[in-house]
Each structure stands twice: as structure tokens, then as C-alpha cells.
């Protein structure tokens, strides 16, 4: 309660100050230092080489966010800088984290869940603001949450709920589920099971993808037989988060059924096919800068940096604790090019946001879909709601 | 049959010069639909450059300026013939503009470039480029021509430009995604709409201080979807009509008390609007439904929906 009051006060004073500010003309009043910290991981090989992951995945989004912030800052005397720290596989991530925290208390991080919690638990991180821009694990928004850890990437649960809403609307209520064997596949599959229960859908059969044959040559022989064993279903849902085998399932199924999940109609934080709600401008800016399309991790890093920028713009300060208060207050809103204002959940630090459901050529729908209601915000029909989350680190 | 022919010929007789029109740019059709204010029918459809958005007439209505966003140019059209006379250098991705009261200088928001470009329509040369915030969109000019406003969608500011020095003299923060700006009270007051913030901020121009914040509440529509965009004032400036985007309503705002008096149901994703020259009718562009709603200004009731092209965006009246 006290916190809320304080943030409201900050917002009001900040407005009074900023509203009368003349152009800064070179005079720097607030310096905002952001660190982008990435732990590189070795990814398993995928069958197809068609879609290599960009090396600057995530980072490019942070860079664009800093550019966006800097333009606004130039009118207010706010200067933004971005330090990039990349930790190769197997090297000491926490040492790099400590060094980054010595320089800045505003971190945007691309790292696996266990590294994120370890980083947030460092004594040096106590007063810092750490933004998770890549890990979709539900537990980070649940029992393993941290008071200094915010999430701009959507969770597996938010994506699964988005898909379940679309499936409900289409009345594709009987699913067959095929999951890969990597940890991300397992986590997304588990989120899909939870969402199916939540929205009253059923999963009538499940199979693990275990083939080690080269599907580029024999998908047309193997996949029909494999999917024949799934029995009757409305839609085939695939959990293949690395993009390993899912692409070979489409149009090779025994039954003529749509494919959804990691392939086919896919729920994503962002996709280059999003063009409404002014998104074309963001896509253009990104492509001009990075010379490639914008992906979910880019979007999450952009949203993290922009959240910092929005809070600095409105409060006129760069201290992490004041920014945290503002970000969690009712006054905070981020225009994220997805049709409605986005804000942070006060119970677990997750950025509430619409989830586009896309195929490679177009947007199919934007979740929350019409008709899925919530007493607070329709956006809270996606992912862990306050009563469901075991996160207590944020208090009230 | 006879009557139809008669009616048709009467129409042709009534139609030439004289008949007031509403010109509507169709963003996704690369055309302009011309609506006859008497018959409330589309009487002409004219091809334009790519992705036409902002449109405005010269003071004597002998020229139409068109922001052809994806052609990266401002086109100049002869409204009589529909012929494109020439292009103006506009900077990249021109979205919206205002014509200075001198009838000569166009101030253009270059959405992809974070720049406001000033073009002399006579010499057809760029005379200034002013760095503004990201995604500039809303443009307004004070009646005395001394101040031009550019709003920037991602920077969330109104930038106050001194037209003499062609430089910014003030920046004021508004709520998220400012879209449109208008001066009233002989330039004494400025209104700026914020789409994602869901508000209109009213400024006292003399010291750029905030006078009021107008909020909207449409019954049965979640507040996130009530998104103010374009707006226009009645001739006496006592009322403003505010397009509320995906809430599919136009708000009628008392411009003295800042209270919302009524919400009028229109087509889907209502964007911009203009009055008939006598200000008795208001025409709103409804992007998603691809039509124009005609509102009776005295009765505050919608009276007709007119199908136009895909994604109608801007509207401009021609007497």
C-alpha cells in the first residue's frame, strides 16, 4: 500500500517537472546505463538448416530499444547507454553478472532459468532490476520468482493459453499431442496440458517424437504411419521448440488435420507477420537496423529496454528502486504495438501482453480472443493469474 | 425506367462544380473515394500513389495534397480532373501533414524517419527538416502560423516548433501513442489525443501547461480498446467529436467542461473525420469495416453508412 502511494507521488512530481522542460540541447541531466548480459548455450543440431538462429537474437532488440529511448531522451536531457556482455558456453556467468552489476543496476538478460535466479540472488543484485528477456519457464513466474526479476518474454503458459483460446473458439477441442525430447519441448507440452484443462479441451492421445532418421528424405513415408497411431482428433498439437521435426509433420499427417503449437498456427511473443497496430513501423525500424526480421527474443529485449525508458521518461530518475516502483504502479503503460497498453503483473513481475497466433505468412488471431473475460484485464486470461501463482516475493 | 433516367440526369445536372464533396483516402486500395454530400454516394474513385493517408486541400481547393506513404512522396492532384500534377519531395514515409496558413509551406510528419519535413509547394523544395521523436504522426498549426505541433507516437511527446526559426522550442509529454493534434480558441488551446493512453490532453498554448485530461468510457467496451485518434471541432468550438478507434464509437465532448456528452456508434476502427462545408454532417473513416459513417451533427445520430475502399484513413471536405 505504502509502495503504491509512493509511486503515485513520484509520477505526479515527475510530470510537474517534465511538463515544463525545454529542450535539453546537449545538457545531460540523467544518465541511464543498461547492461545486456547473455549466457550463450550450445544448442543441439536440428535436421534442417533453413532457419539459422541470428547471432544477435535478442541483442538487436535491446539495441533498437536503446535507440528509441535515446531519441526521447534527447528532448529531456536523458542519456542512454548499453553495455553488452556475452558469456561463452561453460564460462563463469555469475562473475560476468557481478561485473555488470558493478557498472549498472539495470540489466536485460538472455540466459536459462537457473542462471537468471542465481544472478538475481547475488548480493550485488539486491537493489537491481533484472529483466528476463528469454526464459519462458513457468516456475520463474511461480514459486521461483524473485523480487528483482521481471519478465518481458511471454511464458510457455501464456503461449499455451493463447493457443487454447483459439482452439476453443474454433471448437477444435480434441487434441493429439506430439512432443520432442528436449527440455523446452517438455515444458511447452506440460503448459499445453495445463491450458487444455483450463479451457475444457481434451488431449486424447500423446506421442513422443523419437525418430532419428533424416526426415528431409522420408517424412512422407514415416509421418503418416506415426500419426496414424494417434487415432481421431481435431488438431495435431506439436511441442518442438527448437524447430527440429515439426516442419516435416505438416501435410504428411494420416488424417487431414491442422497442425498447431510450435509449428502451424504458433503462439509467439512476436513475429514479423504482425503488421497491425502500428507494428509495421517497429518492424521497419528493426529491419533497417538489424538487416533481418524481428523475433520473439528481440521483442522481449526491446520491451525490457523500452520499459526502463518509459519509467525514466515519466519519473526523470534512473535509480533502480524508483523505476521498480513506477513500473509496478498503475501509472505505467507500455505501447508495445500489439493493440493495447501493456503493464507488469504486480504478483510476479510478468509483462502482461497480447500473444499473436501466427503462421509464417500471416497473423491468424491475437489472444486474448474476444469472449475470454477477466475481472481485471482480459490480458490476465493468459498465463498465471494472481490466485494461481505461488510467487510471494512481490508482496502487495 | 423513365424516372430512373430522369433522376440520373437530374443528378448529373446537380453534380458539377458547386456540389460539396468529402474526399476519403483508402490506405489499402491506393485510391481516393469522393462522396457527394447531397446524395451521400461515392461519385468518383481516383487512383493515387501507394498507401495514401493524410490528405488536405489548398486554400482555394484547386489542389489536393496526398501523403502517398509507401511511394515516399506527397502528390499534388488537380481535384477537377483527378490528375496527379506533380510530386513533392517529402522525406521518407510521409503520414500526415498540415498546410501552413501561408498556403505555401507543408509541414510533413515522416513516420519512419523521426523527422518533420517542411516543403515549399511553389518551389517544390525541402526548406527544412526538424528532428523530432520516433514515429511522428499528428500535425497541427496555430491559426497565426507561428507554431506547428508534431506528435511522436513512440516518444510520447508533442513537439512545439517555431515556424520562424524552424526549430523546436518546447517538448511536452503526453500519454502513450499520441496520434492527432488541433489548435482552438484562436490558437490559445491545443488538444492532443493519445491512442494507447486513452486520453486527450488539453494544453494552454501560452506556457504549454496542461489544462485538462479527457478520459473516455464506452459501455460494454474494455478501456484498453477505447483509443482516441482523430478529432474535429464544431464551428463554434463548443463541441469536439473524437474518433475512438477499435471501440467503434465517436465521443461527443463538451469543449468547455471537457465532459463527454455522448458516444455515437459508427463503423469498425474509426480513425479520422471531417465535416461537410456547412458543418451539418460529419463523415468518419472506419478503417476495418472499409466504410464511412455519416453523422447528423445537430441530432448527434448516425444517419448513413457509405462503402468506400479498403482501409479508409483521412477525410477532407471540398465545397
Image (cartoon, coloured by chain):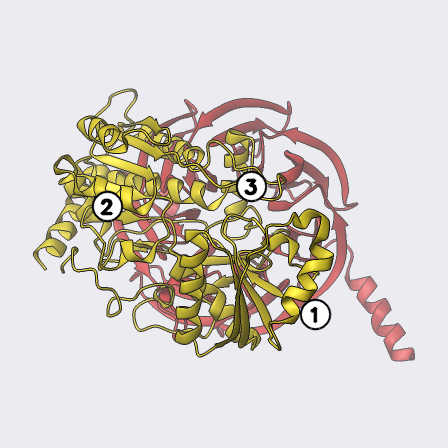
Q: Tell me the distance, in whole angstroms, between the alpha carbons under discs 3 and 1.
A: 45 Å
Closer to the eye: label 3 or 1 = 1
Closer to the eye: label 2 or 3 = 2
Please, what secondary structure does the residue beneath circle 3 have?
strand
Q: Could you tell me residue B18's position as x and y percent? A: 71, 55
Q: Could you tell me residue A69's position as x and y percent? A: 35, 34
Image quadrant for the C terminus of chain A?
A: bottom left
Instruction: Give the colour of chain A.
Output: yellow
**Does residue B215 appear to the left or right of A357 in the view shown?**
left
Instruction: Give the colour of chain B.
Output: red
The residue carrying pointer 1 sits among few (fewer than 14), some (14 to 19) or many (20 or more) residues within 10 Å by Cα, namely few
- Give the vertical position of A16 relative to B308 (above or below): above
Residue in front for this viewpoint, B134 or A263: A263
Q: Is residue B227 visible?
A: no
Kindly identify which chain the residue marked by label 2 belongs to: A
Residue B75 is drawn in which quadrant? Answer: top right
Which disc is residue A318 wearing? none
Kindly identify which chain the residue marked by label 1 belongs to: A
What residue appears at the point 49 percent right and 51 percent down from the top-left corner? A241
Image quadrant for the N terminus of chain A?
A: bottom left
The residue singled out by tag 3 in the image is B95
The residue carrying pointer 2 sits among few (fewer than 14), some (14 to 19) or many (20 or more) residues within 10 Å by Cα, namely some
What residue appears at the point 12 percent right and 37 percent down from the top-left corner? A123
The residue singled out by tag 1 in the image is A256
- Give the vertical position of A200 relative to B47 (above or below): below
Please, what secondary structure does the residue beneath circle 2 have?
helix
Which disc is residue A117 wearing? 2
Amino acid at each position: 500500500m505504502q509502495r503504491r502511494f509512493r509511486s503515485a507521488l513520484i509520477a505526479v512530481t515527475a510530470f510537474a517537472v517534465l511538463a515544463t522542460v525545454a529542450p535539453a540541447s546537449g545538457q545531460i541531466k540523467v544518465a541511464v546505463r543498461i547492461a545486456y548480459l547473455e549466457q550463450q548455450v550450445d544448442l543441439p543440431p536440428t535436421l534442417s538448416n533453413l532457419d539459422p538462429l541470428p547471432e544477435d537474437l535478442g541483442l538487436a532488440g535491446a539495441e533498437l530499444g536503446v535507440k528509441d529511448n535515446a531519441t526521447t531522451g534527447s528532448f529531456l536531457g536523458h542519456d542512454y547507454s548499453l553495455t553488452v556482455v556475452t558469456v561463452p558456453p561453460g564460462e563463469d556467468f555469475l562473475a560476468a553478472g557481478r561485473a555488470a552489476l558493478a557498472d549498472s543496476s539495470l540489466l536485460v538478460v538472455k540466459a536459462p532459468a537457473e542462471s537468471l535466479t542465481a544472478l538475481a540472488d547475488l548480493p550485488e543484485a539486491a537493489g537491481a532490476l533484472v529483466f528476463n528477456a528469454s526464459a519462458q519457464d513457468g516456475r520463474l513466474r511461480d514459486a521461483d520468482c524473485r523480487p528483482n526479476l521481471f519478465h518481458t518474454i511471454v511464458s510457455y503458459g501464456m503461449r499455451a493459453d493463447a493457443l487454447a483460446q483459439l482452439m476453443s473458439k474454433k471448437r477444435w477441442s480434441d487434441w493429439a499431442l506430439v512432443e520432442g525430447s528436449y527440455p523446452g519441448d517438455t515444458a511447452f507440452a506440460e503448459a499445453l496440458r495445463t491450458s487444455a484443462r483450463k479451457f475444457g479441451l481434451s488431449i486424447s492421445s500423446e506421442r513422443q517424437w523419437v525418430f532419428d532418421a533424416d526426415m528431409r528424405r522420408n517424412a512422407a513415408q514415416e509421418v503418416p504411419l506415426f500419426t496414424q497411431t494417434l487415432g481421431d482428433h481435431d488438431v495435431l498439437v506439436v511441442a518442438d521448440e527448437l524447430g527440429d521435426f515439426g516442419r516435416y509433420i505438416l501435410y504428411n499427417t494420416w488424417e487431414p488435420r491442422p497442425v498447431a503449437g510450435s509449428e502451424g498456427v504458433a503462439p509467439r511473443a512476436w513475429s514479423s507477420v504482425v503488421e497491425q497496430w502500428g507494428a509495421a513501423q517497429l518492424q521497419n525500424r528493426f529491419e533497417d537496423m538489424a538487416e533481418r526480421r524481428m523475433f520473439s527474443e528481440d521483442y522481449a529485449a526491446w520491451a525490457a529496454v523500452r520499459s526502463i525508458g518509459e519509467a525514466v521518461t515519466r519519473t526523470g530518475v534512473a535509480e533502480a528502486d524508483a523505476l521498480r516502483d513506477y513500473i509496478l504502479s498503475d501509472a505505467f503503460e507500455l505501447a508495445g504495438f500489439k493493440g493495447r497498453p501493456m503493464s507488469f503483473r504486480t504478483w510476479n513481475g510478468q509483462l502482461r501482453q497480447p500473444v499473436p497466433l501466427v503462421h509464417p505468412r500471416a497473423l491468424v488471431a491475437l489472444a486474448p480472443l474476444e469472449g475470454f473475460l477477466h475481472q481485471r484485464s482480459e490480458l490476465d486470461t493468459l498465463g498465471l493469474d494472481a490466485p494461481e501463482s505461488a510467487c510471494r516475493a512481490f508482496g502487495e | 425506367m423513365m424516372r430512373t433516367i430522369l433522376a440520373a440526369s437530374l443528378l448529373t445536372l446537380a453534380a458539377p462544380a458547386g456540389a460539396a464533396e468529402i474526399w476519403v483516402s483508402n490506405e489499402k486500395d491506393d485510391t481516393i473515394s469522393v462522396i457527394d454530400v447531397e446524395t451521400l454516394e461515392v461519385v468518383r474513385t481516383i487512383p493515387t500513389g501507394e498507401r495514401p493517408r493524410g490528405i488536405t486541400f489548398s486554400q482555394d481547393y484547386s489542389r489536393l495534397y496526398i501523403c502517398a506513404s509507401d511511394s515516399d512522396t506527397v502528390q499534388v492532384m488537380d481535384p477537377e480532373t483527378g490528375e496527379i500534377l506533380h510530386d513533392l519531395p517529402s522525406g521518407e514515409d510521409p503520414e500526415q501533414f498540415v498546410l501552413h496558413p501561408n498556403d505555401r509551406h507543408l509541414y510533413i510528419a515522416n513516420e519512419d524517419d523521426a523527422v518533420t519535413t517542411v516543403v515549399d509547394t511553389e518551389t517544390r523544395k525541402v526548406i527544412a527538416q526538424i528532428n523530432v521523436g520516433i514515429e511522428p504522426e499528428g500535425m497541427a498549426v496555430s491559426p497565426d502560423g507561428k507554431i506547428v505541433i508534431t506528435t511522436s507516437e513512440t516518444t510520447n511527446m508533442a513537439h512545439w516548433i517555431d515556424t520562424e526559426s524552424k526549430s523546436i522550442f518546447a517538448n511536452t509529454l503526453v500519454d502513450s501513442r499520441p496520434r492527432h493534434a488541433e489548435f482552438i480558441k484562436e490558437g490559445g488551446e491545443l488538444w492532443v489525443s493519445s491512442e494507447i493512453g486513452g486520453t486527450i490532453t488539453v494544453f494552454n498554448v501560452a506556457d504549454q501547461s496542461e489544462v485538462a485530461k479527457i478520459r473516455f468510457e464506452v459501455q460494454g467496451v474494455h478501456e484498453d480498446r477505447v483509443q482516441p485518434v482523430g478529432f474535429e471541432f464544431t464551428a463554434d468550438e463548443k463541441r469536439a467529436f473524437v474518433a475512438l478507434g477499435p471501440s467503434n464509437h465517436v465521443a461527443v465532448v463538451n469543449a468547455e467542461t471537457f465532459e463527454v456528452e455522448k458516444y455515437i456508434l459508427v463503423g469498425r476502427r474509426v480513425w479520422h473525420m471531417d465535416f461537410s462545408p456547412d458543418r451539418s454532417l460529419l463523415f468518419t473513416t472506419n478503417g476495418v469495416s472499409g466504410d464511412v459513417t455519416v453523422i447528423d451533427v445537430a441530432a448527434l445520430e448516425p444517419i448513413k453508412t457509405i462503402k468506400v475502399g479498403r482501409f479508409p484513413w483521412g477525410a477532407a471536405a471540398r465545397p
